[in-house]
Image (cartoon, rainbow, N blue to C red):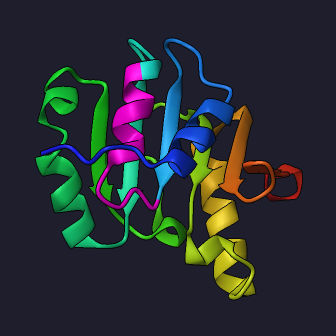
Amino acid sequence: MAVKLSHRLEQIVDALPLRKGMRVLEIGCGPGAMAREIAQRIGNGHILAIDRSSKAVLQAISGSQAEIEAGCLSFRQVAVEDFILKDGELPFDIAVAVRVGALDGRHPEIEKQALLKISGALTPEGQLFIDGGAPLTEIPLDKYR
């Protein structure tokens, strides 16, 4: 059974600069509720949702069969600081992270490594958004590119 999107996550998705056909990377997807909502909004685009927890990824996959079968959503178990594009995988237009410990400022070395990996997975104009602000904050990536 799909998890309903919380009001907070709905506000975050509403604030993202989503458009039809774009590629989105969600970092720390948990049970996949936000990924499913983004998939609906980007039409023929694609969202890759990652999480370091195998349990979270399995839960997200089990609740997202329609989107996976439609080819607009996929999941991968990987920590953001270890994430790299697979051979032939296209870069992403935006990345979004909500409540991701590697990006919350408590672990500067892991954060630096994560930002380098995220930058490498985005298009040259790609943007990273994290929770915070009203309701999102864009993290500048110029020094990591």
Image point (19%, 20%), residue name:
70
Q: Is residue 26 magenta?
A: no
Image point (12%, 45%), residue name:
1
Answer yes or no: is residue 87 visible.
no
Q: Position of residue 77 (x, y in %)?
A: 29, 63
In this rendered view, identify the residue nearer to me: 84 or 103. Answer: 103
Looking at the image, residue 25 sits to the left or right of residue 139; the answer is: left
Q: Is residue 128 above or below residue 50?
A: above
Q: Is residue 45 above or below residue 83?
A: above
Q: Is residue 51 above or below residue 89?
A: below
Q: Is residue 31 magenta?
A: yes
Answer yes or no: is residue 104 visible.
yes
Looking at the image, residue 68 sits to the left or right of residue 101; the answer is: left
Image point (29%, 57%), residue name:
31
Main SS class of the magenta portion in the image: helix
Q: Residue furthest toward the front?
A: 7
In this rendered view, identify the residue nearer to me: 86 or 54. Answer: 54
Answer with the quarter of the image where residue 114 lies: bottom right
Image point (22%, 28%), residue name:
67
Q: Position of residue 143 (x, y in %)?
A: 88, 57
Q: Position of residue 123 (x, y in %)?
A: 66, 33
In this rendered view, identify the residue nearer to me: 119 or 2. Answer: 2
Total numbered badges shown on the rendered structure: 0
Answer with the quarter of the image where residue 139 lies: bottom right
Q: Position of residue 27 (x, y in %)?
A: 49, 56
Q: Is residue 124 above or below residue 118?
A: above
Which residues are drawn in magenta? 28-40
